[in-house]
Image (cartoon, rainbow, N blue to C red):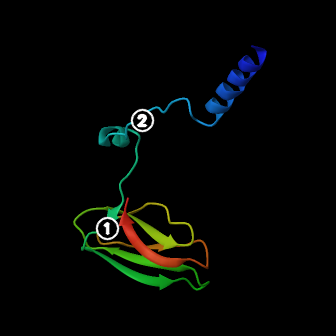
Amino acid sequence: MMKFRAIAIVTMALGGSLGLMGVEAVAAPSTATVAVRGASVMAAVPSCVKVTKTHQDEGYKAFKVKNNCSGTKHLKGIFTYGYDTSCHAVKKGKTDLLSSTQPWVGYDKVVTC
């Protein structure tokens, strides 16, 4: 009887630690929940924003963006193999430089943020 009880206890302990007990379903957050949390959706830049690939004197890659739109655009430079830029507010008619902070990155794209 003791052997049976010991085996049952070990089986329950292993079953619980291996995740065999049960699975809890979790729903994906709704778009309203995401908006409340302050998450932003990144999308392609509009055609009124001119994007040019360039680099700084030190060799760091950058995107030069010129906002030809009717209002302020919030833009972010995306680089492969490194950190992306922060979100920059570029006013109507202005130019900004979205530069990497690492010399080994590659160009990817510019998105809205």
- The residue that appears at 37% across and 40% down in the rendered structure is 29
For disc 2, the marked residue is 26
- Compared with residue 12, is residue 87 higher up or lower down, i.e. above or below? below
**Which x, y percent locates residue 40?**
38, 51
- Rendered image: mark on residue 44: 1
Count of numbered tags: 2
Which secondary structure, mark 1?
Answer: strand
Query: Label 2 amino acid?
Result: Val
- The residue that appears at 34% across and 72% down in the rendered structure is 94
**Which x, y percent locates residue 11?**
67, 28
- Rendered image: mark on residue 93: none
Circle 2 crowding by C-alpha within 10 Å: few under 14, some 14–19, many from 20:
few
In the rendered image, which quarter is residue 18 located in?
top right
Query: Label 1 amino acid?
Result: Ala
Residues 22 and 32: in front is: 22
Horizontally, residue 1 falls left or right of residue 74, namely: right
In front: label 2 or label 1: 2
